[in-house]
Each structure stands twice: as structure tokens, then as C-alpha cells.
Amino acid sequence: MFDFREKPGQLIDAHGQDTERKGFFTDTSICIGCKACEVACKEWNEVPMDGNLELLESSYDNTGDLGANTWRHVAFIEQDEQQIEKARDSGQKLVSLGMPSIGAPEARQKESAKHIGMPEFGSPGTRIKEKVDNPPNPDTPEFRWLMSSDVCKHCTFAGCLDVCPTGALYRTEYGTVVVQDDICNGCGTCVAGCPFGVIERRDTGTIHTKPDRVDSRYAMDVKNEGTANKCTLCYDRLVDDQQPACAQTCPTTSIKFGNQSEMVESAVERVTTMHAQGSTEARLYGANPNDGVGGIGSVFLLLDEPEVYGLPPDPQVPTKDLPHMYKKVGIAAAGMLAAAATAFVGARKK
Amino acid sequence: MTLSDFDSYRPANEGRRKKKRNRPAGNGRRRGGGGDGAREMSMVDDVEFSDSYYGRPIVKPPPWDDKISAYLFLGGVAGGSAMLAVGAQAAGLEALRRNSRLTALGATIGGTGFLILDLGRPERFLHMMRTFKPSSPMNMGTWILGGFGTAAGVVAAIEVDRLTGENLPLGPLRALLHWIEKPTGALAALFGAPLASYTGALLADTAVPTWNAAKDNLSYLFVSSAAMASSGVAMMTTPASQTRPARALATLGAAADLYFAEKLTEPMHPAEAEPLQTGRAGKKLRWAKGLTIAGGIGAALLGGNRVAAIVSGAALATASLLTRSGVLEAGIESTKDPRHVVEPQKARLEARRAQGIVDDSITTVG
């Protein structure tokens, strides 16, 4: 059977460099919604402003969604008792499904053996350390606030990359997916190919804060207008052994950056800890190499179902079914030729 | 609930409002009161969060509009016309051959024009041809279009030369062109078939719920639509005495079109099929169905009459354009409400879990 999906492993090797797949682990349980990641990303990557300064009336989220001009997006979700209970149940259900474990079993044992009871009395230093290790839960039983910094998933099987007709989208030596802005011709196929709604064509955007500044002498052209744009995992910083701007600026280490395999490992460790502490609403998103996109480069720890955060619950890379679709294309083409031939049977001019 | 000693000064908790489902984001006012900062206020009216993030889209629609519908339609007309031209040449139907070849080239030029105009950076159109990439239907389509356009261009040039009484400044090239006329016409027909059908994969190979769910039958629907559209155009351009085969193809195409339009939604989840049945797209597709039936019957029974042939042909061509536009619009519509994404995905995840497959979920607990 043909498989048209691009194989990231081979491509990282093809670069002929000694690099590893890089990725994020975004731990939303310690996100405080400060949006420093959004700001750092905009600044570093010179991403234009998105439209006018509008209040979207969705809690403190006035960014809306990821797109050509938003490469990090912090979601804010306010939940009541019922919803908290529901999230806890759905997380518990994942455990009871008996899914095979995909991460380090040592971490699991270590955690379950760890003492997680009342903090012991000791020196102020120990007490502070204890608080840092086991932070008090600020949520109340009736209310909680979910905050999550969303970003391009840098999929193992990247839909956008597969369908790109120009080869502008490619796999870097860090296993990330990046657009070459001088190649992309803005056909928009990648926008439809992404199961997460991340990549977008930059048709709008402004570097001005107010419409009347368009004519000012500080006016500049919008960068890369008409081409597809998305997170590059700060490719230009990686080549200088720096970490992406969002991860470096994150004040709570909610956004962690490193080798993708290590990110998955620490994600598994964290979710195990949380479950051991009774936070059964915690779950990982994208840490499974068997899922529809082959696992993702930017793993998330979520505290509710993915769709609550605007993430698809079962994304599949469309290219997986491309052999089937091409078969249909072939049969359809043959059928049309046959129909045309049939129509001309006995049609010689008298 | 008490967080600190001062919380006892809070006003009594007001009861939560009745839930509103699927409230569109962005309209409605914030709740008044409590703005003195005395306590944490919910900044949003109650919204049902359980299946979406403020009702915002999950996948994004491609930036495609009716220029792409026109391209899909014209590509089909071009491919079908090239086939009619080959048949007409073999059967000695000169007017049909000439008109079909000219239609094929005209539709190719028009379609390619729309395709280029739809790009964000039209001047970079040729970047499509800097690589040969089978994983991208758009890339494959460009190569098919290029091959087709070249072959269709050559045979159309021969027709133009004939029309002008062999007055084009072709010189010694004329003999060569006449020598390759037949194989080039056949080549155009061979490229014409995938030109009409690849667009099914182009739309289906996306995360757009309705298009992706149409993967089983979309190519079949599109070739049927192409067959009836190209025959319809031939019925309009060519005297009835020469269009008997075109009328036969039109009838076949119309029947197949009606069949596959019905089959299209069969394997779909209701939430994926809905955009094809409701709204503007649904209306377009219902009109397309009516026009296909009328045009198909007209082509089968009244095609011998020149006026009836022109009317039937126009009905079939319009039906094809409406089908393409309806399918395109339904897909774009299906990205707007996250329900079309979430419901089918949850259903298929549940179905796999019911079968005992639990190792392929993107959500895990370690």
C-alpha cells in the first residue's frame, strides 16, 4: 500500500546534521494567562497585529485563535462546579479505558511511592520549597479558570506540509515544520490541510495600531503578505542554540522547550503526578505516536476535553487516506473516458 | 467557600443564569455589577463549554471562493471537451471536433486564469512546478493542467489555422503540427480525464469536514458533472446534426451526476452532511439537481432541435457550475461551526473504543 505521508525521521536524517527533534511541553496546569508568550512571539518574529483592538467578550482572551498573525494564543475558560466534575470524570474514564502506557514506567512508580500528604513543619526554606513543590490549589470547588497557551503542533505527520504544492513547507533538521516565505505562493491548500486550524494565509494584518496611522511616516509594509504563515518554533533561534522566544519568556515554565522525546517523558511524569494527587481531570494531548497525526511536537497537558480548548478531539492527517482518494480519481477518470467512448459508438458521419 | 477572613463581607452569591446553548461569541453585554473588584467575577455570560471554545472554529477554511468553483467547472469542461474532440475526429464530425477543441483551450485558459488570480502571490504561480510532489493533489493537478494545456493548445492552434485559411505564420511547423494532430488530440483526452477527476482528491485531501467525508464519491461526482457540462457546451456551440454523441454523453453524465450526488452524503456523519443540505450551498445543490434533470431529459429527447439543444446544454452547464460552487461552499461552511468537526470526531473515537481500539487516541493519561 502506498503511503504519501512524509516521514519526519528520514527527513531529519537527510539534513545530515547531528540534531534532534525539538518540541514544546505546554503544561496548562501552571499557566497563569499572562500572555507574555504571545507578546514575545510577536516581537521576535515581527508578526503583524491582527485587525483592530477588539474585546471579544471571551473572558480575558481578546486574541481569539491561532492564525497567520497569531502564533501563540492563550485560551481562557471559566468553569463552574458541574464542568469541573465532568472534566474530572472524563479524565478518570481515560484511565479506566486501560490505555497502554506510552511513557516511562519508572516515573509512574516513583510518583505513586512519593509522599504527597500534609506538608511537614521545618525551616522556612523547607516550607517554601514544600509550597513550590506542592502549590496550594487556587481554584475553588465552584469555580476554576483554565488557561492554555496554544501553538503550532509541528505534527509528526503534518497535513500542511504534505499538501503544499510548491514545497514551501518543509521539515527542518529539528523535526519542525517551517514555511519558506520566498517560495510560498499563497495557494491556501495548507490552510485546509491542517487538522488544527493553525496555519493561515496572511491576507490581513497591520503593523499600525490605529487606521489613521496608515499614512504616517512610520508606516511599513506588512511582512510576507499573501503567503502562509505560522509558528516556526523560532527556527532562527534554534540554529543559534537558543530556545524559542515564548518558552524563554514564560514566567511559570508552563511552556517548556527541549528534545521532543524528553518533553513527552516529562509530560507523562507530570500527568502521573497529578493523577496521584487526585487531579484526575489532567490528561496529555499529542503524546501518543499512534494517534491520527503520529504524535505532535508540542505536547500539551490539559485539564479538560480538548474541544473545550478549541482543539480537535480526534485529528487525522488527511494524507493518510490519499492512496484511497487517488484510486477514486483513477477509477473516475477511466469511467469518464469509457463513457465518452460509449457515447461515440456508431457515430460515424453518414 | 471562604478564601480569607475578608470574604465574609462579600454580597450573597447570585444564582447562575439559565444556560444558553451555542451562543455566538462576541455579541451580548457583560453582566453588570460586581465591578468594584471585591471578588472574582465571571467575565462572560454562561456559555456551554462542553463542546467548543466560545463556538469558535477549530479548522480554518482555505481562502478559496467562487474563482475556485469556476476553475473546477472550467477544468471539467476542458477535460470533457478534449474527449469529445477525439471522438468527433474519429467519427468525422468536423464542426464538433473544431468547437470542442476551441472550447477545451478556452476553458483551460479561463480556468488557469482563475486559479492564478486566487493565489495570494499570483506572480509565483510557477513555483507550483519547481517540484513534483505526489503527496500534494494541488501539485499533481498543476502538472496535469500543464500537460493538458500544452496538448489542447497544439490542437486548438491547428483549428485556428484552419479557420483562418492556413494563414497563421507557421511556416514549416504546419506540416509537423498536422502530423502530430491525432496523437496530440488523444494525449489531451488522456490528460483531460484526470484533469476532471483530480479535483475530487484536491478537496477531499483536507481537514475540511464535509470535503474530507466526501472522499468516497467526490471524484465520481466531479467527472459526471464534467461530462454533462462539456457535452452541454458542445450542444450550445455545435449544430444538432453533429451533436448526437455529445447528447448521449450529456444524458449519461446527468444520470451519473444525480446518482453520485445522492451517494455523496451516504457515508457521512449527519453533521458532515448538513452543510450540503442546508443554507446557500444546499439551495445551490437543489437547483443543480433540478437543472440536471431538466437538461438531461432535454438532451435525451429534444436534442435534435437546435433551440431545445441550446437550452438543455445551458441548463447542464449551469447545473455543473452550481454543483461545484455548492460543494465548495458547503465545505467552507462546515469549518465555521466547530460542531461539524467535534461531533464526527468524537463519534469515530467512540466507535473505535467500542471496538476495543484504545491505543490511537490523541488524548492520553500517561
Image: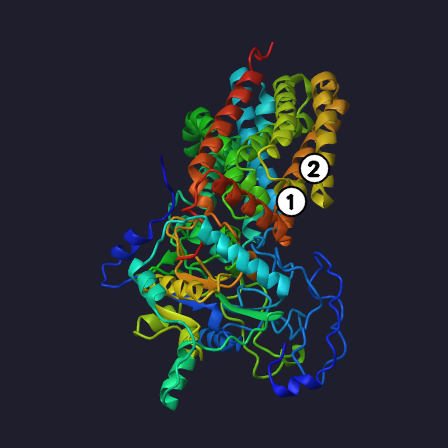
The chain holding disc 1 is: B
Q: Position of residue B308 (x, y in %)?
A: 76, 23
Q: Give percent across and percent down for residue A247.
A: 41, 74
Determine if marks 1 and 2 fall on one subunit: yes
In the rendered image, the quadrant that contains the N terminus of chain B is: bottom right
Q: Which amino acid type corresponds to the residue marked 2 in the rendered image?
A: Leu
Query: Which label number is shown at residue B285?
Result: 2
- The alpha-carbon separation of the residues under discs 1 and 2 comes to 10 Å
Labels 1 and 2: the sequence-earlier one: 2
Using the rendered image of the protein, determine whether residue B263 is visible from the camera's viewpoint: yes
Residue appearing at x 55%, y 16% in the figure = A342
Q: Secondary structure at mark 2?
A: helix
B294 and B60: which one is in front?
B60
Res. B122 in view: no
B161 versus A67 height, above or below: above
On the image, the x and y values in percent for residue A86 come to 58, 58
Q: Determine the image quadrant of residue B11.
A: bottom right
Quarter where residue A173 is shown: bottom left
Circle 1 packing at 10 Å, graded few (<14), some (14-19), many (20+), is: many
Callout 1: SS: helix
**Which three-letter amino acid code belongs to the residue tagged 1?**
Ala
In the picture, the disc for residue B330 is: 1
Query: Tags 1 and 2 in contact by the CB under 8 Å rule?
Result: yes
In the rendered view of the protein, which quadrant contains the C terminus of chain B? bottom left
Q: Is residue B295 above or below residue B320?
A: above
Q: Position of residue A41 (x, y in %)?
A: 47, 74
> B266 or A201, which lies in front?
B266
Dot 2: chain letter: B
